[in-house]
Amino acid sequence: MHPEVRTPVNAPVRAAGTTGTTGATAAPGTGAGLRPLSARSVVLSLLLGAHPPEMPVKDLVSAVAPFGVGGSTLRAALSRMVAAGDLRRTDTVYGLSDRLLDRRRRQDEAVEPRTRAWDGDWEMAVVTATGRGPAERAALRARLTDLRLAELREGVWLRPANLLRPLPTDPAGAAQHYMARPEAPAGDLAARLWPLDDWAATARTLLDRAARAEHPADRFTAFAAVVRHLLADPVLPPALLPANWPGAALRTAYAAYRREMTALVHRE
C-alpha cells in the first residue's frame, strides 16, 4: 500500500509527489518536489491497502476525509476513474482494475528490488537499431531506464550486475545485451553514471519532511515523493555507494508508512 505514482524507475533524480491533477486538494508544502494531493491518488492508495482491493463508496467517503477530499470531489473522481479503466464498479463498490493491479505489482518490484552479491561484472546494453523515429527512441530509453541502466554515451548503457531480474527479450533487435568488466575503477564509473550525492541529499530532505509531517495530507504527499525518489535509486552494490547512503533508511520509512495506511483501511 503506497501513494499512487506513475514514474519511470530511472527518472531524473529529483523527488516529486503525486502526478494526477484530478480533484486536487490541499497543497501541504513545497520543496523536495512535493505536489498537491489528488483525489485519484488518495483513492488508489487506499484501495491498494484493502484486501480484496475494493471498498464501498460510503467507506471511501470516510477514508478520504482526513486527506482533505470531500464527498462530491470523491464521487466525481470515481466516475472519471471508472471511465479511464482505473477502477471497476459493482453497485456501490469500487475496486481496482486488473490492469492497475498488474502495474502496481511491477512498481512494487521496482521500489523494493531483489539484489545479489556483486562479483564485479557489469550489464551492458548497446543500441544497435538505426533509423528510428522519436517515439521509438523514447520507448527504448524508457525500457532501458526501467532496468536501472544509465547511459555512458549515446547508445551505450551500463550498470553493475547485482540485480536479480531477467533481461527482457527484444524481438525488434533494437539493443543487444552483454556482460562486461570495464577498465575504469568501478567507483569512478558509478559516480559518472549517477548523481549519487544529489540523490542522497534529496533522500535526506524527504526523510526529514516525512518525519515532521503530522497531518494525513502532509504525510501522504511526503511519502508520494519518497516513492518517486526510490524509483530513481540506482540500487548499486554497497562497495560503490558513498558513505552513509540513505537508501535503506528511506525504504524503512516507506515500509512503516505502508503499514500505517493499511491499518487505516482496515479500520474502515
Image: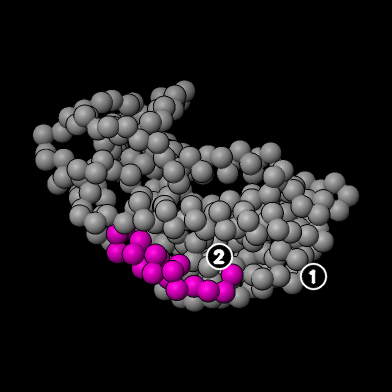
Cα distance between the residues tagged 1 and 2: 21 Å
Secondary element under disc 2, as helix, strand or loop, is helix
Q: Disc 2 marks which residue?
A: 220
Residue at left offset 55%, top offset 65%? 220
Residue at left offset 72%, top offset 43%? 52
Residue sitting nearer the eye, 85 or 175: 85
- Whole-percent x, y for residue 166 in the image: 41, 27
Residue at left offset 41%, top offset 30%? 165
- Whole-percent x, y for residue 106 in the image: 53, 39
Sequence order check: which comes first, mark 1 or mark 2?
Answer: 1
Residue sitting nearer the eye, 81 or 239: 239
Q: Disc 1 marks which residue?
A: 72
Q: What stretch is highlighted in magenta?
A: 199-216
Q: Is residue 5 magenta?
A: no
Question: Which residue is farthest right?
Answer: 91
Q: Which amino acid is tagged 1?
A: Ser
Q: Which amino acid is tagged 2?
A: Phe
Residues marked 1 and 2 touching at CB (< 8 Å): no
Q: In which quarter of the image is residue 117?
A: top left
Secondary element under disc 1, as helix, strand or loop, is helix
SS majority, magenta: helix
